[in-house]
Amino acid sequence: MNAEKDDPLSAADFYDMRRRWLDYICEVDRLSDRAFRVGYWLAKRMNGEDQKCWYTHKQIAKILSMSQDTVARAIAELEHEGVLIVVRNHRKPNIYSIRLPFFMR
């Protein structure tokens, strides 16, 4: 069960998964502080209905007072760790959703 499936989790299940996801990324020593900060910010903007959020690197950078390059590196780290799903759309904001690593295995 993950955020890519056609049958999304119920809102309550999603919020529980998001809580566990936030706990997990807080404890992963392979993630930088910037990756945790960006991941936390993105996850808190996802709702239980569609379980995704849409933001550009520019928007995230401005809100978090980071450079766009720092945001891009943080998102790449989260993707590499297998905890963030990013759907890139040409000339549109990326779509972000979370994935717990043990759901993938």
Image (cartoon, grey):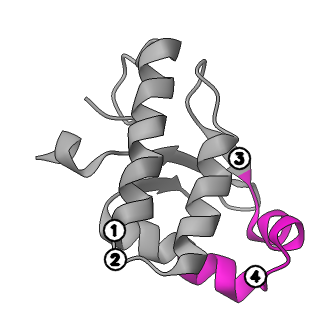
Q: Amino acid at mark 2?
A: Asp
Whichever of labels 2 and 3 marks the residue nearer the N terminus, that label is 2
Determine the residue located farthest toward the left in the rendered image.
105
Disc 2 to disc 3, how far (Cα)? 27 Å
Does the CB distance between marks 3 and 4 fall below 8 Å?
no
Q: Nearer the viewer, mark 3 or mark 1?
A: 1
For residue 11, side relative to residue 6 (left or right): right
Q: Which residue is mark 3?
A: 54
Q: Residue at x 75, y 82 (%)?
A: 68
Q: What residue is pinned by disc 2?
A: 29
The mark nearer the N terminus, 3 or 1, is 1
Q: Nearer the viewer, residue 26 or 81?
A: 26
Is tag 3's residue or tag 4's residue first in the polypeptide sequence? 3
Residue 86, horizontal then vertical, whole percent? 50, 56
| Circle nearer the N terminus (4, 1) | 1
Q: Amino acid at mark 3?
A: Trp
Q: Amino acid at mark 4?
A: Gln
Residue 13 horizontal side relative to residue 59, left or right:
left
Give the image quarter of residue 29. bottom left
Q: Secondary structure at mark 1?
A: loop
> Viewer-nearest of labels 2 and 3?
2
Instruction: State yes or no: discs 2 and 1 in contact (Cβ < 8 Å).
Output: yes
Whether tag 2 and tag 3 are in contact, CB under 8 A, the answer is no
To which quarter of the image does residue 30 belong?
Answer: bottom left
Q: Which residue is mark 4?
A: 68
The boundaries of the magenta stretch are: 55-74
Check contact, mark 4 vs mark 1: CB within 8 A: no
Query: In the rendered image, which quarter is residue 69 located in?
Result: bottom right
Q: Which mark is residue 28?
A: 1
Q: Does 61 lie within the magenta span?
A: yes
Q: Amino acid at mark 1?
A: Val
